[in-house]
Image (spheres, rainbow, N blue to C red):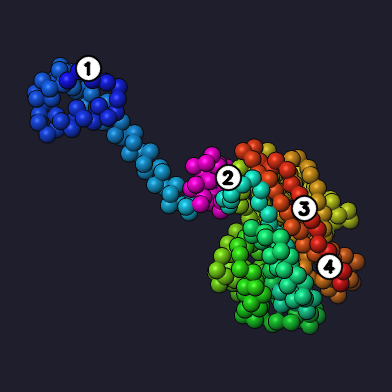
Amino acid sequence: MGTPNRTSPERLAEIINFALENGDEAACKIFDLKSETLNRYRRKYQNEVNRNFKITATLKKIEEQYDEKELKAIAAGGRIVPGYGKVPMVDFEGEAIKFTHVTDTHMGSLFFHEKHWDMVLEESRREKVDFICHSGDVTEGMSKRDGHIYELSHLGYDKQKDYAIEQLSKWRGKYYMIDGNHDRWFLKSNGAIIVKDVCAMLPDATFLGHDIGVISLKGHAVLQLWHGEDGSSYATSYRVQKIIEAYTGGEKPNILLCGHTHKQLQMYERHIHAFSGGSIQCQTPWMKSTRKQAHTGFWIITAWINKTGVAKLQSTWYPFYA
């Protein structure tokens, strides 16, 4: 039968399976082996089977955690983000991906204007963005601040949730969202996670968590959404700089999208492309009384992704003069 390839897994399987069906003596005669050689092959084959079993079990665990597109991104060389649990992975054709960044819509507030929201969606459609990121304060919530109730267009959890679903449903694409301090007033008062509940009622929305959320772009770049409960700073850039300074080396995102302060900003620091997203909500009486500006508007951002992260980035700020 010729000299067998003694290192080939296929040849090992052939010999061992023949021995199982026909006995060791027949296998030694047919394959011209000594009994100790057959036993050595048997041990080697068993080690190979155990190894393959472990690999298969590991791949099964990965398969259970990711959808088909995410698995394709991993297979193409994408990495799972270190230091995080399951991170949604956005795969796409070509080198570039385009997305809209909005924040602080405060739906349910008298100072959220549907015409502005409609303009966000109209421009997002025109620019053919792949998804919309929302960096928190989707709803206005209900605080205990004196007079706040008179600034609401929709009163209570149910009314604000239904209104947010109505407005967000105008976009037929993907959303990635976190909640903010205003959204969490419902959590603090009655345990309701309103942004999570809103996302559950939309056809293609992902709730990423409280204050901070992460997605992976093609497995090679990390995009992080950030809200926070701190306040504005005298210098517009100071807050974003301090957020960036707080990252340890292995936790840094490639792109950072900030909400909360209603300020617009773009900066590049520590190799992070950072954006402060302004707001969709206009300046409120409370903001006027405390001398806080509102930079109303939104970003559309195009990022070119390669195996080392963000190769280049292009952004456009759309202001609302209201």
Give the answer, above or below, for where 222 lies relative to 41: below
Closest to the camera, between mark 1 and mark 3, is 1
Check contact, mark 1 vs mark 3: CB within 8 A. Answer: no
Along the viewing direction, whichever of 286 and 282 lies nearer the viewer: 282
Q: Earlier in the sequence, mark 4 or mark 3?
A: 3
- CA separation in Å, label 2 and label 1: 46 Å
Q: Is residue 103 magenta?
A: no
**Residue shown at 9%/29% (left/top)?**
23
Per the image, label 1 sits on a secondary structure element best described as: loop
The region drawn magenta spans 69-89
> Residue 12's image quarter?
top left
The amino acid type of the residue labelled 3 equals Ser
Category of crowding for the residue at label 4, using alpha-carbon neighbours closer than 10 angstroms: few (below 14), some (14–19), many (at least 20): some
According to the image, label 4 marks what residue?
Answer: 320
Horizontally, residue 86 falls left or right of residue 225, namely left
According to the image, label 3 marks what residue?
Answer: 315
Check contact, mark 4 vs mark 3: CB within 8 A. Answer: no
The amino acid type of the residue labelled 1 equals Thr
Q: Earlier in the sequence, mark 1 or mark 3?
A: 1
- CA separation in Å, label 1 and label 3: 65 Å
